[in-house]
Every structure is written in structure tokens, then in C-alpha cells.
Amino acid sequence: MKFTPEVIAALAVLREHADNDFERHRIDVLERDLTAPPQVEVIDDTHQRFNGMIYHKNPSGHYMTNLPLHRAVWSFNHGQIPNGYHIHHIDQDKANNHIENLQALTNNEHRRTHNNLTKQIFPRICPVCGETFAPKHRAQVCCSWGCAGKLKAKPPVKKICPVCGKNFTVSYPNRDQIYCSYSCALAHRTNSHIEKICPTCGKKFTVTYGQRDKIYCSRDCVTTYLTKPRIEKTCPVCGKNFSVRPSREKQICCSRSCRSTLINANRKK
């Protein structure tokens, strides 16, 4: 609402005919609200209020309703935004939508401003010698090649071989090495045994490392599992009777359409 001379005259008449101090105070508050432009009010981390409307924070960091908050603030104070112009946050903080932090820029100016800020490289401290230097690119960590070599040349790692019990050392890049040699690694794989439980008969059996994918203890158990009778079930959606293989005993519905119907019903609940 604009504070026009007609509004000033109307408020003056109301103030003269006020019966008590409380009514005059309410008129003064109304005049103050009309004369002072609205300010951006921060409600919480994801909501802000401006000119009676609440704006929600979207994934990009801007505050939105039907119009972005920073564009609404600039339009309220300066009028309609010219075609082709963007509203730029001067301090790069999208949560700071006060009019002092907003600037109207063309598309090229806005893009150039953000590119310059992205390319800006600040001085760093070398982690090896502790000197402050100006890096030539963003990935540079050390001040020189010598310091970079010292940073990479970390001391070797001491380990104990689990097969022969021999102490050995490996360089830092090979710190995940377990065995002292290929022969010890091969001996561990060929001699190690893995315990498993047969899903058909329930007996415990052991396999070598090369047979670690084996599931059943014998061919008879494999044949017994494959020749099991089918399981009869009733679909909870359509009520139809259907049968499944033993390997699909957890199946509930008779078809994909019934399964989708059941999932949607559970989501609504």
C-alpha cells in the first residue's frame, strides 16, 4: 500500500476524532506500518517472511513462493525488473535478501561476476614447510615440488604375514598388502577352509577358498531342493490361488499389478 497524501489526510481526521489514547496509538502504529517499507524477517533456517508472505527455501538455496524472494524485494523497492536483468546477491549469501545486498545485473554481467568469484584463489599455507604462498591453480597444496615430494614420501608400513609370521615392510601406496609374497597368498587361499550350512539338510560342511560359491553339501541336496513341491498361496489383493517355487517362498502377490496395488495401499496408510 502506497503512503499517498489522501491516506495522510484520512489518518489525520481519524486521529482528531479518536476518543481515547488507545485509538490514537493504533492510528500511530498504522501510520508507522504504512510509511516504513517492509523488511525481510527470518523465521527459521528454511522460512522467511516479507510483505505478509512466507517464502520457503528450495534445494538451490533460494527462497520461493510464486516469485523468488530476492526478486520480490528488489521489485518492491525499485519497481519492475527490466527484461534480461538478474538480481545478484552481493555477498554470495542466498539467505541475505535485504535490499542493501541485492544488485540488478545483466545476464552476462551476472555470469562474469560468478565466474570471477569461482576462479579467485586465496593464499595458502604449505603443510610441509609452513610458508604462505599464492597457488597457481586450485589443486596446488604445497609451495614447491620438493615439499610435494616430501608430503608423498611417507614412511613405510610394518606388517606381519598371517601365513609364515614373517615381519615385512611395504611402501605407503601398498599399505593394503596383507601377505609378504605371492606364494604365501596362494598358500592361504588353497589351504583355508570356509564353514557353511546346507540350506536343504542343515548340515555343516567346509569348502576351500576356490569353492567359496558352493551352497549345497552334495548333489543329492541340490536335486532335493530343485524337486521340492510348489507352495500354494492366496493373493491378498485379488484373492486368487497361485503356486510358487520354493526359491520364491517370500512372494506374496500373484502378479506385478497386484504387488503395485498392495504397495500403493500401504503407502496411503
Image (cartoon, rainbow, N blue to C red):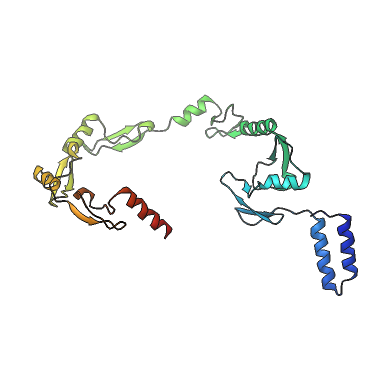
Depth check: give the residue in front, 185 or 120. Answer: 120
- Left or right: residue 258 compared with residue 218: right
The picture places residue 263, in percent across and down from the top left corner, at 37, 54
Quadrant, the C terminus: bottom left
Measured along the vertical axis of the image, is residue 102 above or below residue 128?
below
Measured along the vertical axis of the image, is residue 79 above or below residue 125?
below
Which residue occupies 74% across, 45% down?
75
- Left or right: residue 173 compared with residue 51: left
- Left or right: residue 190 compared with residue 92: left
The picture places residue 63, in percent across and down from the top left corner, at 63, 48
The answer to whether residue 40 is visible is yes
Indicate the quadrant where residue 44 lies: bottom right
Indicate the quadrant where residue 7 lies: bottom right
- Left or right: residue 97 compared with residue 237: right
Depth check: give the residue in front, 45 or 60. Answer: 60
Depth check: give the residue in front, 13 or 166. Answer: 13
The picture places residue 212, in percent across and down from the top left corner, at 20, 40
